[in-house]
Image (cartoon, grey):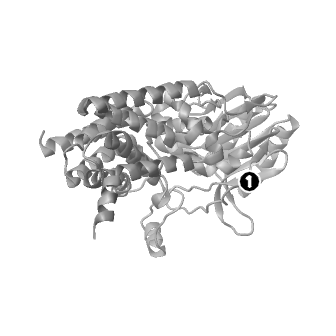
Amino acid sequence: MTARGGHWLALAAGLLLALAFAPTNLVALAFLSPAVLFWLWQGATPRTAAWRGFLFTGGTFLAGTYWIYHSVHLIGQAPVWVALFLMLGLVAIMGSYTALHGYATVRWGPAGGVRRWLVLLPAGWVCAEWLRGWILSGFPWLALGYTQLETPLAALAPLGGVFAVSLAVAVSAGALVALVAGGRTERVVAIVVLAALWGGALVLGRLEWTRPTDREVSVALVQGAVPQTMKWVPGERERTMGLYLALTLPHLGADIVVWPESAIPALADDVQEYLDRVRGLAEAQGSSLVSGLVRREPGTRALHNAIVAYSPAEQWYYKRRLVPFGEFFPVPAFVREWMRLMNLPYSDFEAGPEDPPPLAAGGERLAPTICYEDAYGAEQIRTVRESTLLVNVTNDAWFGDSSAPHQHLDISRMRSLETGRPMLRATNDGVTALIAHDGSLLETLPQFEPGVLTGRVVPRVGLTPYVRFGNVPVLVLLALGLAAGFAGALRRHARSP
């Protein structure tokens, strides 16, 4: 194969990997696509390996996060060049992690064998996933582990989170390369590793890490399905307020009623009379109302993307992980002024405090997240330890009928699986869902249709190993894997003058 042919194959394999994620869920590609990249790195120069790694992951994010263009240009009404710049900039940044992985593996790793295929390559892959989840504020999307919610490997999530599942997938991909390119010894080891990995996951899948409480909670999740292009239009506020009240009234009496992110298109103070009315109606029927709202904090006047819970006391949660260029603009002041002059979408929210307490609602303790911050699993652990349920409110109307809402749903499912807690997931236009403690879907609402999802969930107590230790055990494994993989280079460096 020519060098150019290898580049094109790397790009094609990366594009196909996006199909392993929701909504297509072609799970086999989660193993085959990385295996192709690992194979393409065999015999390549460090520079060639870097280019192929860049093209591979660039292709994955181009196909897997194309919806950024939709949200920025079609919904946010930013110029085409701004939307393309943000989308392609993200693609380039994500591709650079795998480029570094490929360069380092070829430059300093072993040429082949078990240490390369089953240790260094998987460790490097998951290390790249972890790094891209927090550098430059992080974008922890499209981790391999999210493709495995319906396979036995999902049982590893309560032990080590999504990165433990990603590591198992990457090891499996490396084993495929060993079976194709290795000798007899490498093939035997690969078979043994695959059998132990998948057999162990099957056994772990029978374990219950948390335990149910002695009560069921009735819930009502309200989906207004208000188009994002209409939501903040003058005159729509009253219609939206009437819609949410009309949808909610028949279901008052449920223990917990949840409205989605910024359900009412106004500052909370501007609709206080309306909120007090809904709160009173809910309390009269024994319901706790939980709603996403935009709030200007008294005193500081800081603007927050928030959740309020009335149970019956008023409690506030402020979003901690803000969306760059969506909820805040990480640019100097003079650039902000230029953006105002250019009529670009502009708003700046303030991040909430770290480690907030749970919200009390319906006699339970809720660990809250807003929008995509539920993708940062480790940051929720302290709140989860004191909680019996998870709640996520989001507004995926920004992404239309794309893959984004389905990818986001799988992220929420993974959080339930990691923590052993059911999740109440209320969205503006889908996918509103009740998620069981094992990540399975109990009920969902159709997208883009107003409705109320009702059901009953059993709160859970107890701690999974992941909630106890977070990502630390997986990070230790990655460090050991990288050290073992680069052991030869380290020894050569130690012997050099």
Which residue occupies the foreground of this view, 303 or 135?
Answer: 135
The residue positioned farthest toward the left in the image shown: 2
Q: Amino acid at mark 1?
A: Trp
| Picture coordinates of residue 277, whole percent (x, y) | 81, 45
- Screen quadrant of the N terminus: top left
Tell me if residue 277 comes above or below residue 497 in the rendering. above
Density class for disc 1 (Cα within 10 Å; few <14, some 14-19, many ≥20) is some
Q: SS of the residue at dot 1?
A: strand
Query: What is the number of callouts on the image?
Result: 1
Left or right of 3? Residue 324 is right
Q: Position of residue 50 (x, y in %)?
A: 26, 52
**Left/right of residue 5 with respect to residue 392 in the rendered view:** left
User: Where residue 407 sits: x, y (%)?
Assistant: 48, 37
Does 381 appear above or below 351?
above
**Do we see residue 279 in this rendering?**
yes
Q: Is 195 in front, or is 139?
A: 195
Give the residue at the far right of this rendering: 284
- In-front residue for pair 201/213: 201
- The quadrant the C terminus occupies is bottom left
Quarter-of-image position of residue 394: top right
Measuring 34% from the left and 36% from the top, which residue is drawn there?
174
Residue that label 1 marks: 316
Can residue 262 be seen by looking at this rendering?
Answer: no
Image location (x, y in percent) of residue 270: 72, 56
**Residue occupying image coordinates x 32% and y 47%:** 58
